[in-house]
Amino acid sequence: MDVISKFARGTQSIPKNVDFIAVMADDVSVSILEMFVLEAMIPHAFVFQGSVNDLISMLANVDHPPEQLVVDVSKSAMPHTDLANLANVCPPGVSVVVVGERNDIGLFRELLRMGVDDYIVKPLTMDLLHRVMGRLNGRSEPVHQIRTGKLVACLGSRGGVGTSTVAANMGWRLARDLERRVAVIDLDPFGGSLDILLGSQNNKGLADLLKNINQLDPHYVERSFVQVAPRLFLLSARYDLGEAGVLPAKSLNMLLVELKKLFHYVILDLPCRGGEIAASLVNAAETVVVVTEPSVISTRETVRLLQLAELRDTKVPVMVVVNQPNQPGRAELRLPDFEAAVGRRILHVLPFDRDAAGLGENIGPPVVAGKGPLAQAMRRLVDDLAGRHLEANAANVPFWRRLPALGKFLKLGG
């Protein structure tokens, strides 16, 4: 049986399941890659002539991301920009080998910083390809630490403050608007609300993966998710209410290591503030999001959550989000009092908007897809998470807030 599921020089007949894709800029390189794939017996391979932009368009039509890409940038006018655009649609764990015409050590180092596994210079030879990518499995030996996605842990100071809403809206905007590949994981095994908030279905995919944690492969993991939208995937575990189900922390951490290879962002919706799982995931996260409200109880619990994050060996960004899930009243704490109690300035406040919140929860789409002050605040929050806060928020900050010295002098800024 032929080990290659599909093999063509055009992009029209790309297979849905492909593990190896090579896009070359010239006929000679295409022919050499074809011979290499046959000789190395790489299954599910696809080689064609085209550009990086062709490859980006192609990746939108495959069922699951490939394991390895070989990309020719010799005819690219802006190779750094093209590869950055490719990284936006390609999961972090995909191995990328870049082919070019310049024997430039500076370019090589820059590509390594971008997450590329290796850079080879034309003319291509069979010997060179085997030496770089390996005769048996067709994958390169990594010359640096494998690039992985970002793990974001969302915790609430108490039930009902909107932690699931924030997690769902983060996933929606990152995938739909910022075009990142995102996994949102509902860690409430007895019926979380992420499926409703995302207008999707709940399943037992998470429970199945944790039971078979030693038998994971990318295809099995992909099938366990519910695809909500292009680039947005949901994973959950719906146990029966009488079932004695506890998510094992060790297996969960092993799963997250694998998921970070497949997604740019893995967003966790934690139903509890403490315990082994919460402490373990806060310790593993690259960003911790604490959702709270201006009440005495939430203030106390916010301080405890911040202390939990500070117990880590390494510092981690902690985003405190003050939500107004109910109509503000005179008994609630003022924001300056809340900031003084928790010991930090709050950059993200979600205003009370009953209609927008109700539509997002019951009808959809999520709040962040709409208009109004709540949607705008949610978008600023997600942009901050994605590192786009400088350009995204500049227009929303009064000029005196951008000039601390002037603000202090005029007593206008805080």
Image (cartoon, helix red, strand yellow):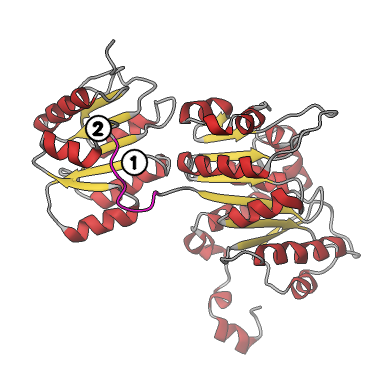
Q: Is residue 140 magenta?
A: yes
Task: Give how far across and how far down residue 303 sits, in percent.
Answer: 76, 67
Give SS at disc 1: strand
The answer to which quarter of the image holds residue 194 is: top right
Q: Nearer the viewer, residue 380 or 298?
A: 298
Task: Give how far across and how far down residue 353 sits, in percent.
Answer: 75, 49
The answer to which quarter of the image holds residue 28 is: top left
Q: Residue at x 82, y 60 (%)?
A: 298
Within-10-Å neighbours for mark 1: few <14, some 14–19, many 20+: many
| Vertical relation: 387 (above or below) 215 | below
Name the residue carrying label 2: 22
Q: Residue at x 84, y 29 (%)?
A: 241
Tell which circle, 2 or 1, labels the residue nearer the N-terminal end.
2
Give SS at disc 2: strand
Q: Of the residues tagged 2 and 1, which is closer to the observer?
A: 1
31 left or right, relative to 382: left
Amino acid tagged 2? Ala
Say which quadrant the C terminus sits in. Answer: bottom right
Task: Give how far across and how far down residue 218 sits, in percent.
Answer: 47, 31
Tell me, yes or no, if residue 370 can be seen here.
no
Say which quadrant the N terminus sits in. Answer: top left
> Residue 16 — which label?
none
Name the residue carrying label 1: 95
Q: In this picture, which residue range is highlighted in magenta?
A: 139-146
How far apart, in angstroms, are the residues tagged by discs 2 and 1? 12 Å
| Vertical relation: 233 (above or below) 297 | above
Q: Residue at x 49, y 64 (%)?
A: 390
